[in-house]
Image (spheres, helix red, strand yellow):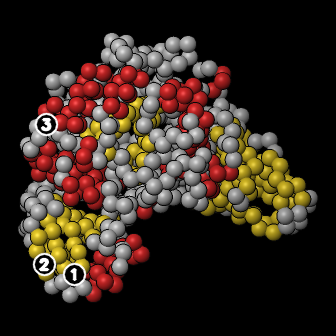
Amino acid sequence: MNNTFHKPKALPGKDYYFDSFSNGKVLLDKKKGHLPAMGWNSWNAFGSGNTAKLTKAMADKFIELELDKLGYQYIVLDDGCYKSERINGELSNETQKFPEGFKALSDYIHSKGLKFGMYNDIGTNLCAGAAVGTCGHEDTDAKSYIDWGVDFLKVDNCYYLWDNATFSAATNAKYVYAPNIKGIRITGPDYDRYFSAVLDASTTGRGCRIEADYVTNIGTYDGTNVGPTPVGIQSSELVFEVDVPCEAMYQIYITYATGEEVGVGSWLQLAIGKDVIYDDFLPATASPDTFTDSNGIEANLRAGSHKIRIMNHRRQENTLNSYATLLEGLNKADSNHDIIFSICEWGKTQPQNWGYKVGDSWRILNDITFCVGADGDPGRGTWTDCGTASVTSQYNKAVIMDEFAGLDKGWNDPDMLMIGMNGLDDTMCRTHMTMWCMMNSPLMLGMDLRRVKKGDDIWQIITNKELIALNQDPLGIQAKRIYTTIETDCPDTDYITDNNRCDILVKPLANGDIAISFINLSEHPWDDTIRVNSKLIAKMLGAKLINADDFCNAKTYSVKDLWTGNTRVQSSDIFEVQHLNAFESITVRVSAL
C-alpha cells in the first residue's frame, strides 16, 4: 500500500464526528431542497459495456418517449467509461467506447435539454477494477467533472482503504473496529482504580458482544445486506461511569488486544463525555486474545462523575470525510455548481445517519440486481430474494426509513428501477413504480430504452403522471407505513422481511391531499379487506399532515385511483380494499371535500 494512505487523515473538525451526526447541520454548503432525481443510469442496462453510441441512443429515446416532459432529466454513465489507468494523473475516456471524449457527449446530452451524469468511487479503484478512484485525486477529478459539464455524480465505495469494503483488503477491518477491551485503569492524585469491561461498564448501540472477560465487536454495524434494521443507534460503545475525587490530570490505561478481522481492530477512540481525547491506532498485540496495557492517555478531569467512552466510529466518520473531500473539491472547482451528489456505499456505514450532511441521496443496500444486461440482453430482476437483489428486499428496508429523508436532508436510495428487465411482469412493475414513488426514492430507469415504444405497457408504467407527482410533490415527505397485516406494535419502524403480507402506506401532499397505497407483497391473492381511517392516518403522520383537522372532519372525500383514473366520492372516512392480486398494489389520492 502507498505509505501516503497508511492512515486516514484526521477529521477536519467536530462536525465530522459521530456525536454531530444528529445535529441536522450540512457540511460545505451542501444545497438543500432537491427533490428525488429522475433519469436513466447505464449499469442495469449495459453493465461495463456502455458506449457513447448507446448513451446517445438513450438520450434520443428520452425525447422520443417524452420522458423529459415528465421530469426525467439525468443521463448517467456508470462504471466502465474510463481508461484503466490515469493519464498524467487525470481521468480519461476509454477511447473505443467514448472516442470523442466526455465533454462532447455532455454537449450532446445538454443539446437535448437533458442533464449529464458520471460515476466514480471514493476508493483507489472503481468497482469494475479501473485504477482511477478519486482517493487522493479529489480536487483534480472535481475540476474534470466541472469542465465536462457534469450535473450528477454517483460515487461508489469499492477498494476503499479505510474499511473492508467490496474488493478491499479484509485486514482493513483494523480501521473500523476497536480492539477487544478487558478494562481500563485510571490513576491520579490519591486515585488508582481498575474497571472491568464486563463487570463495570455498559454497552450502547448495536453490535457489541460480551465474552467471558472482555468486550468485542465495538464498531459500526455493517448495513450492506438485509437483516439488520436501519432504525436505532447503529454504532456501539463501551461506557464507563467514573467518579474522581478532585480536578487533576489523570492517566487512563486500556487493557486491550488488537486484530485485523471483522469484530476486532486496532483503531481506538477514547472520549470523556463528548470530547475525543484519543483517535488513532493502538500498538498491535500478538493476537486478538493476547492482552496488554496501553501507554497512559492523559485526561484533565474535574471532580465528580464522568462518562468514559471506548469506541470506534471511524467506519462512518472516514466514509463521510471521503465523500466530503470530493464535495469540497467540487466547491473549489465551481462554488456555484448544483451537481446532484449520489452516495453509493450500499448502506455499509449506515449512511442514513450522516449522508444528509453531504449527499442528495444515499444507497441503503447492495445492488438491486447482479444480473445486469448488455446490448441485446435486457438483464434480469427479481421480486424477492434472500439477499439484496430484489424489489422487496430493497423495499422492506427503505419503507421504514422515512424519518431519515426530506427536503432538508436528502433521499433514501433503494437503487435503480428494474422495470423493463426480464423477470418482472407488468403487475410487479406497476407495484415497483408505486413503491419507489411513494418512498420518494430517486427514479433512475435501468433498462435499455430501445425496448420501449410510446404507449406500450412499460411506457404506461414509467410515465404515470399521477404517480410521478407523488414522488415529486413539493412537500417532500416520504410515505409512512401505518399498517401491515403481520402483527407488529410499530408498523412504521419494525423491520419485516416476511413478504406474506399486505402493507398500507400513507403520504401527505403539499395541497393537503394524501396518497394511500395498499400493497400485496406476496405471491398469493389477498382476499381479506384491509382498511385505515382518517384518525389513524392523522395519528401516524402527526404534524406532517397538512390541514389535519379539515381532513379528519370532512363530510365527503374524493378518492382517485392513480392507475385506473377512476374517481369516486365517499362520505365515510374509512379507506379500504377488499381484494389484491398477487404482487398487486392499489394507490389512491384522497382529497377532503
Q: Which residue is disc 3 drawn over?
A: 452
* Label 1 SS: loop
Reply above or below: 393 against 491. above
Q: Are marks 2 and 1 in contact (CB under 8 Å)?
A: yes
Q: Is residue 196 visible?
A: no
The image quarter containing residue 288 is: top right
Dot label at residue 188: none
Residue drawn at 49 percent across, 53 percent down: 32
In three-dimensional space, the C-alpha distance between marks 2 and 1, rounded to whole angstroms, equals 9 Å
Q: Which residue is located at x 54 percent, y 41 percent?
A: 336
Question: Depth check: 90 or 402 in front?
Answer: 90
Q: Position of residue 118 (x, y in %)?
A: 40, 31
Where does the image place residue 290, in percent across and percent down from the top left? 65, 37
Image quarter where the N terminus lies is: top right
Q: Is tag 2's residue or tag 1's residue first in the polypeptide sequence?
A: 2
- Categorize mark 1 by other alpha carbons within 10 Å: few (<14), some (14-19), many (20+): some
The numbered mark at residue 569 is 2
Q: Which residue is mark 1?
A: 593
In the displayed structure, does residue 589 sit left or right of residue 136?
left
